[in-house]
Image (cartoon, rainbow, N blue to C red):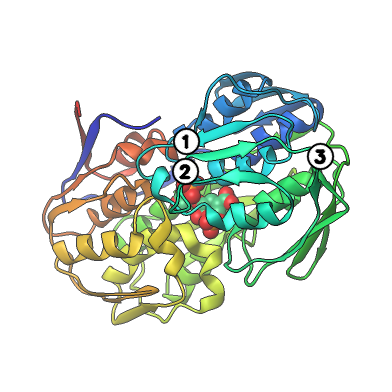
Amino acid sequence: MSHANQRRFIIEPGGSLSGDIRVPGDKSVSHRAVMLGSVAEGVTRVRGFLEGDDAMATLAAMRALGVRIDGPEAGALTIHGVGLHGLSAPDEPLDLGNSGTSMRLLTGLLCGQRFATTLIGDQSLMTRPMRRVTEPLGQMGADIVTSDKGTAPVGIQPVTSLMGIDYPLPMASAQVKSAVLLAGLYARGETAVTEPGITRDHTERMLQALGYPVEVDGPRVALTGHGRLTGGSIQVPADISSAAFFLVGAAIGAGEAVTLLDVGLNPTRTGVVEILKRMGADLEVIAKGDGAGEPVGDIRIQAASLEGIEIPPSLVPVAIDEFPALFIAAACARGETLLRGAEELRVKESDRIAVMATGLERLGVQVEALPDGIRIVGGRLGGGHVQAKGDHRVAMAFAMAGLVADGPIVIDGCAEVDTSFPGFAGLARSAGLPIAVEEQAG
Ligand SMILES: O=C(O)C1=C[C@@H](OP(=O)(O)O)[C@@H](O)[C@H](O)C1
Ligand SMILES: C=C(OP(=O)(O)O)C(=O)O
């Protein structure tokens, strides 16, 4: 899971994107499909599963917890669900690699079990904050230990029961919301979470799609423990967070139109579309329907001259993973772009404000990192050597900058791209990005 190898991307100038592009399956939906399919009764068939390291870490964890899962084969999985009470103790700590979603959601799912589990991860994951989940889960009666700093290893001790809580989320986090709701499946009475801003609602949608009643009342989501999930079919849409790199690449470049196919259009994820539109992007969304509670469609986009904007705070949580890509769009826009209220970016796989600001400066962009955001003044992008610091989204964002830079861009620390977007470089090359990959044994 952790990448001993170093990977470098080199992007030569002069590329442009065109054509139809199908990016891999949605990472958030893939995690939830494996977790919920595992604790459902009967068989769940998943299609479009993301075969990236993060979702594969969740899959390996559920197997280690005694669930039989066939596949993945070309994105197809068959999960032989064991029911809410059918998981068994793993033989060793569960290694969740680079994946915050796996660690936080599994802490919720596993804290009401009658066996102990330890969760670990790679260097980046072992520094990410876990108290945000252990605190509310502790209020429910869970027995969880972290390091003094509130980081992994997460040691979960068995308990005989959990109690429901009514929890106001202190930050807009779908991972915390989901962890509490998953623990709520094992709790007495009602478990409710109220969010301060809209966050992705895949957990709620998938619980409902598998027959578990969930009550949604504005920002409050509630469920009652000890019900049943029933296995079903889950079609995972293409990941809008992966599509975002191509949306930005097409918007800033000089190519023809690009169409991103069968992308998940859940309104809790489409902030990137709204922000690009506000910046003046020429894009069209073609809705196609709904698969297991998740809306899907195509997004067609072509180059346009972009304007800097002030990003409305309400769009921050619904575009949270797309900011590295959006910062590249801002660097190519006319005028200034200002992002505030996005302090969560500092606790992702890297400190995305600091790492992006440093890289943009390297490319000659005028940028000011703020405690909770960034100010970017658009202009010409030069070539240069930047560090992705092992952050997949930073690596892919800077790769797209290569479409407009006037010299080559060299990006180090790109191996983790495989966590969310295996095959990124090949797909980007076939769409028109002159990207070369160098692997070095680390
Ligand atoms: O629930 C999820 O699947 C995710 C929630 C977000 O994290 P936070 O809950 O920390 O905002 C997001 O950044 C992450 O990539 C995936
Ligand atoms: C923040 C991300 O993921 P996670 O929290 O699961 O590591 C991401 O994919 O951008």
Three-letter residue code for mark 2: Ala
Q: Residue at x 34, y 53 (%)?
A: 350
Count of labels in the image: 3
47 or 226, nearer to the observer: 226
Q: Is residue 363 visible?
A: no
In the figure, 344 relative to 257: above or below? below
Mark 2 neighbour density, 10 Å: few (under 14) some (14–19) many (20 or more): many
Query: Residue 212 sits in which quadrant?
Result: top right
Cβ(mark 3) to ligand 1 < 8 Å? Answer: no
Disc 1 to disc 2: CB gap under 8 Å: yes
**Amino acid carrying mark 3 in the image:** Leu
How far apart in space, not on screen, are marks 2 and 3 (Cα)?
31 Å
Q: Which mark is residue 120?
A: 1
Q: Secondary structure at mark 2?
A: loop
In the rendered image, residue 385, in percent from the top left (x then y), is placed at: 13, 52
Residue 30 place in picture, x, y as percent: 60, 38
- Secondary structure type for disc 3: loop
Q: Mark on residue 152? A: 2
Instruction: Name which of mark 2 and mark 3 comes first in the sequence.
Output: 2
**At label 1, which amino acid type do we have?**
Ile
Side of 385 where 100 appears, left or right: right
Residue 361 image-quadrant placement: bottom left
Residue 17 image position (x, y, % from top left)? 33, 50
Give the number of the mark in front: 2 or 3: 2
Q: Secondary structure at mark 1?
A: strand
Residue at screen point 35% across, 41% down: 123
- Which residue does the numbered mark 3 point to in the structure image? 210
Please name which of the two marks, 1 or 3, marks the residue nearer to the observer: 1
Q: Is residue 271 left or right of residue 368?
A: right
Earlier in the chain: of badge 1 and badge 2, it is 1
Residue 119 placement (x, y as % from top left): 52, 35
Q: Earlier in the sequence, mark 1 or mark 3?
A: 1
